[in-house]
Amino acid sequence: MPIQTLPTSPFHDQRPGTSGLRKKVTVFAQKHYLENFVQALFDVLPDASGLTLVVGGDGRYYNRVAVQTILRMAAAKGYARVLVGQGGILSTPAVSAVIRAYGASGGIVLSASHNPGGPDGDFGIKYNIGNGGPAPEKVTEAIFARSKELHEIRISDGADIALDVLGDTLLDGMQVSVIDSVATYAELMRTLFDFDAIRKLFASGFRLRYDAMNAVGGPYAKAILEGELGAPAGSVVNAVPLEDFGGLHPDPNPVNAEDLIGHMFAPDAPDMGAASDGDADRNMVVGRNFVVSPSDSLAVLAAHAKLVPGYAKGLAGVARSMPTSTAADRVAKSLGIPCFETPTGWKFFGNLLDADKVTLCGEESYGTGSNHVREKDGLWAVLFWINLVAASGKTVEALVRELWTEHGRCVYSRHDYEAIPTDKADTLMAGLRASLSSLPGTTVGGCAIALADDFAYTDPVDGSVSQKQGVRVILTDGSRVVFRLSGTGTEGATLRVYLERHEPDASRHDMEAQTALKPLVDLAETLAHIRALTGMEQPSVMT
Ligand code: G1P
Ligand code: ZN
């Protein structure tokens, strides 16, 4: 029999987090570990006959092995067809684009995003549904429940598929189509942006440095920016996806992308710098001698969206995650469109996008996107910025300064405390939560507190309620300190402290973030006792 039923013992640690199941490669490599999760997924999904599934990943270590296993299990599940990116490669936004373009019933993304790769690094898997976006919580919870009880996996014993060769093969009656990893995505970008204007911009000498950080964004950026838009060869660097990202930490922020920052602050800096992360859904945009914060980036894109063909009719609304700065709210207000505040994590944007309530969305964590797919999209954001530069004739810095002049400046920083013992992190959050009701109306270290709560969100589309999405302390002048624990780390707990202060006078020169935010850092310490509870004197990362 080509389809085998193999006995197995269930695993109990397969609860997907905000971005799917992420574990060390060593955990995934245990016998039947990946199979257990995939079987749980397939058991939860309806009958697959006649349906198409998309499979692809960011090319990190274990990607190819996992793709072959998933193909065999998809054949056993009875899918009519699986579309797999060449070499097993598809960026996260490309998976979303392919699901939507082909009318697939869903897709499996293999990635641990920006987490380190390699044999000692991380691996991850998540399921996206037919709209192209991450499965909702009721689906991921059902997968988790099933993963703890299943005793059998079903898998074809067919041969490995030649993943590097474009074309179709049959695997136990299922059609496997190896597709070009970039083509569908590039086609979508052509419908959104003014490629002619961007070509002219590059032809006029505009210089870009795009650092793909040895991750999956490379092939996309090279094909589109250099191949199609005429950016000079070499504009895209670190463009070949490597299994261990060549040791880089492909999480674009000024700390991890320090080489790019070095180039952008050098005397002969290019006009614009950009970087994307492990699976190419995150982006960082840098001007010459000028770092753009992700919160400001979202606000600038919203303010000028009408300059871009795909958004020429204007925006239905914008959405930002709660810890993201309020810059987008200010722009939305001036445009007369709604701005939604959602919990952290891309999945909350999906319903708003599907219901046409918003067109653009973004997070402070270097994620920006729109209704073109149901994931954040790194290269899309970079193309949007280049299109704005081409259409407005303004530099990156000028576009941001204009935002500040019009709406004031949201001075912003995020402080991360990584690898804290989980019990310590829980104690810290519990202590904060217990103090919340006593804070409003008090003044702590000179900070007058107006509101303190644990953010809860009622989805305006389906009415579902998400509780405990982060502790917010809002001062009478609108400044905010937000505390939450990461849902994506794989080692202990990570505490994130988000700090925001609004400065109406854009011409002030003393707004270096860490200095300007010092009173809020002190407030955070007083309220949460971070040093005492974590034993850490400083955050591990400040962005
Ligand atoms: C982090 C970011 C969040 C983002 C997620 C997936 O999650 O903070 O904005 O949606 O990665 O890319 P966290 O680790 O904070 O739970
Ligand atoms: Zn990512």
Image: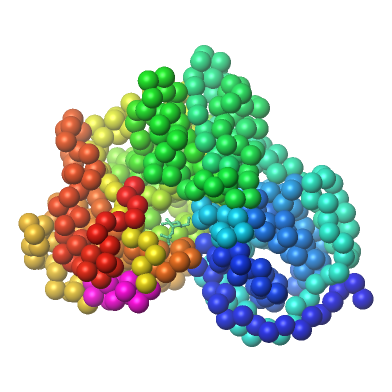
In this rendering, would 433 be left or right of 46?
left
- Give the magenta-colored segment's residue range: 422-432
Residue 390 screen position, x and y as percent: 47, 23
**Main SS class of the magenta portion in the image:** helix
Above or below: residue 306 compared with residue 413: above
What is the x, y in percent for residue 233? 61, 23
Position of 208 relative to 110 (above/below) = above
Name the quarter showing ligand 1.
Answer: bottom left
Residue at 58%, 42% (x, y): give it: 214
Reply yes or no: does residue 79 show up in magenta.
Answer: no
Residue positioned 82% across, 62% down in the render: 80
Residue 178 rendering spot, x and y as whole percentages: 79, 49
Residue appearing at x 28%, y 68% in the figure: 534
Decide which of 171, 78 is in the foreground and name it. 171
Q: Nearer the viewer, residue 481 or 456?
A: 481
**Please, is residue 228 above or below residue 66 in the view?**
above
Within the image, what quadrant is residue 42 found in? bottom right
Q: How many marks?
A: 0
Q: Residue at x 56, y 33 (%)?
A: 237
